[in-house]
Image (cartoon, helix red, strand yellow):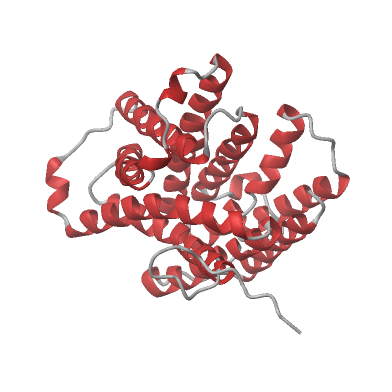
Amino acid sequence: MNSKKPQQTDIPFFGLVSTRSLSIGFLVIVSAAYTLLSVGSRLLAEGFQPMTQVYMRVALGTCALLILLRKNIRWNNFRALSTRDIWILLSMGTLGYSVAVYFVTLGALNAKLVNVAIIFASVPFFSYVYSAVFLKKPIDFKLTALLFVSFIGISFVATKSFVPHLTAFGIGEWFTLLATATMAWFYVGRKLLSSRLNTSEITIAVMSIAVISGIGLALIRGETFSLTAFTNPHVLLGLAIGGFMNALVNPIEIFAFKHLDAVIGSQILLLENVFALIIGYLIYAETITFPELIGGLIVVGCVYVANRLPQ
């Protein structure tokens, strides 16, 4: 009996690897990359203020992607965009990207890496709420129940207690929760866009808007740009990590989800919590308390179950 051969990838240097195996490997890399971006934020904080380092990292990533994706970009399509699409792209680039990355940067600077990863895992629930409001998706009572349970888990993580109080929420955890709420708009905004632009064009447009809005917000906040910061090797390492990861994550994540079931891909990305725990311990000697552990298991469990529900 003939067995069906696994599809081989046509990416150079990966010719002998099946597309499925490569996609799984890419998502494992993405999971680790999200935590490494937080490490990069801490390194960059030695020389630059939060919003300044955000637009610098995104600018580097945008330049790299312009080179990598140049063959997929049809510049004439941007001139034919509707006013509605323009406003959606502006909101995605500003609120869903630069502001979201700014908040997650503040979260990484003020909370443990694993706490940032756990809270950020709840992005799908915010997307669900926005989808119900803006995409008129029907209310799913199972998802609603999981949403409330996940917030209980988040409260355990943020307060490090089984009897949480709002006043006990850590500032880093609040920032991460704000990042989760704003980043979710990026995904919902993508659904609201028309089909005039392809994925590469949307990526470049959103990241370019994020750079411009980031510079504007940094000026409003009174942040300064110091050239002497480039003499700090930690800052240079943080900039390299931030720029490289911003350029790497988007294309390989798109490739992976193109060739993998969305549910399987979403479950693999939950490995970010494991990487955050390991990297946080090895680099910063961060440990996790029992309430944080239970809260993290609740959040990750809720996301896991939600991802397996019919979409």
Q: Residue furthest bottom?
A: 1
Q: Residue at x 16, y 55 (%)?
A: 232
Q: Is residue 137 above or below residue 34?
A: above
Q: Whole-percent x and y of residue 44?
A: 28, 51
Query: In percent of the image, x 84 and y 38: which residue is there?
Result: 139
Q: Quadrant of residue 126?
A: top right
- Pick out the residue farthest to the top: 83
Residue sitting at x 72%, y 53%: 150
Q: Residue at x 53, y 63 (%)?
A: 27
Q: Is residue 87 left or right of residue 51?
A: right
Q: Residue furthest front?
A: 1
Q: Give the answer, above or below, for where 170 lies relative to 15.
A: above
Q: Along the horizontal axis of the image, is 78 left or right of 254?
A: left
In this rendering, the count of numbered labels is 0
Residue 172 percent coordinates (x, y): 49, 49
Q: Quadrant of the N terminus?
A: bottom right
Quadrant in the picture for residue 194: top right
Spot occupied by residue 67 in the image (x, y as percentages of width and height): 31, 44
Q: Nearer the viewer, residue 197 or 91?
A: 197
Q: Which of these two is toward me, 96 or 194?
A: 194
Q: Is residue 113 left or right of residue 300?
A: left
Question: Which residue is more in the foreground, 298 or 141?
Answer: 141
Q: Vertical placement of 107 versus 189: above or below?
A: below
Q: Position of residue 25 (x, y in %)?
A: 51, 69
